[in-house]
Amino acid sequence: MKILLINPPAYTPTTYPYSLAAMKTELAFRLNEKICVLDLNASYHFEKFHEYYKRLRENPKQYFELLEEFSNKVKENGIQISKEMRLDQEIPEIKQLTEGIIKEEPTVVAISLSYNSQIFVAKQLIDRIKKENSNIKIIIGGPADYSKILEGVKSLPSAKEFTKYLVSIGAKEKETSDGIKLLADFSDFNKDHYFTTDVVYPLRTSIACPYKLCTFCTHHGNTNFKLFDLSTLKETIQNNNINKICFIDDDIPVIRIKQIAKILKNLNVKWWCQLRPTKQIQSVLGEVVESGLTSVAWGVESGNQRILDLMKKGTKVEDVEATLKYAKTLGIQNMLYIMFGFPTETKEEFEDTTDFLGNNKEFIDCISPSIFGLQFGRV
């Protein structure tokens, strides 16, 4: 049996898709079958917009200017594809992508859908796969809303359910195992297909959020917080020759980040993570920086205390400011998540946030602003 994990096109490919790398590791741990990954999003854009990749190789210092230009092209192309698909027009590139899938001779094709923008391409891929080889089993999963394309495919919510299904159709389970050795296996990805000057590897050491109280957030999925065994972290880094890491954990508790730093200290890596700017985190930043921490994305959200309390952020404006100042003295690059338009926010409170950003601009390297949007599951 051959299981093919696929990431369909739709977004700017700047880094490896962690979900597929982690899924491959999970399945390989449990099954004695051939498991491969195809990042069609990366290969498609590499072929479609090859001139941008060439320009980047020739002018790496112009990365951010080229990235903005390239991303706009990707968006324009995605919109055009969506329009053509709504008119039931066949997209030549979809035929080529399907031929690449069929050539792999898979028993099962599992399509990962992280973004709603992937739905249109996924639908045509599914239709063409069925037409070319109706014996191929097609599975879809991921956080995107794929409820409209379920006809003739199977939706499975987790790796556990996926494994159970594969066994039910003939996959061979491993009788013994020493345990999962890696957090993720990135060996199937072609680094040349990613629009970046240096690949930053996404890694996750936990599931869900240890805090899980922010009233605007649904990212944790209301699932229980679970820590992965950190004994696999070192081997994952060494096995994949990783020197730059982006930890995509929703948040990392103080004790946990110290444990991670201890493992990373002698591995000569640079890394990034997401944290809440609390007084407690200040106590470990100095120690953590020594292990290669270079940048933090801080969940600041607002510069007004009433809004922070409504959000249940568990932070104080004065602690946020002190954390940013201290981090900057350690050489950490500070990226801030900011949210405007939270319910009942007044003009004055909005200006408190803009004033906060202005007053602390010397400690801020990058701002990622957003506007509040009510999501299902939060009230």
Image (tube, rainbow, N blue to C red):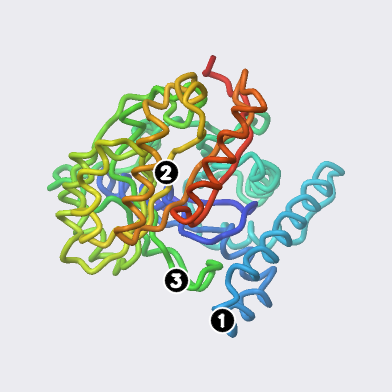
Q: Secondary structure at mark 2?
A: strand
Dot 3 crowding, Cα within 10 Å, few <14, some 14–19, many 20+? some
Question: Which of these two is toward me, 264 or 304?
Answer: 304
Provide the residue designation for mark 1: 57
Image height of 236 relative to 134, above or below:
below
Marks 3/1: CA–CA distance:
11 Å
Question: Which of these two is toward me, 293 or 100?
Answer: 293
Image height of 112 relative to 202, above or below:
above
Provide the residue designation for mark 3: 198
Q: Residue furthest top?
A: 379
Marks 3/2: CA–CA distance:
23 Å
Question: Which of these two is toward me, 211 or 101?
Answer: 211
Q: Quadrant of residue 278?
A: top left
Marks 1/2: CA–CA distance:
31 Å
Seen at 64% across and 80% down, the residue is 55
Image height of 75 relative to 144, above or below:
below
Count how many numbered circles sit on residues in the image: 3
Tell which circle, 3 or 1, labels the residue nearer the N-terminal end: 1
Seen at 25% across and 47% down, the residue is 29
Residue 95, given in percent of the width and then of the height, sits at: 71, 58
Contact between marks 3 and 2 (CB within 8 A): the answer is: no
Q: Quadrant of the C terminus?
A: top right
Kind of residue sitting beneath label 2: Trp
Provide the residue designation for mark 2: 298
Residue 204, given in percent of the width and then of the height, sits at: 33, 46
Q: Residue furthest right?
A: 87
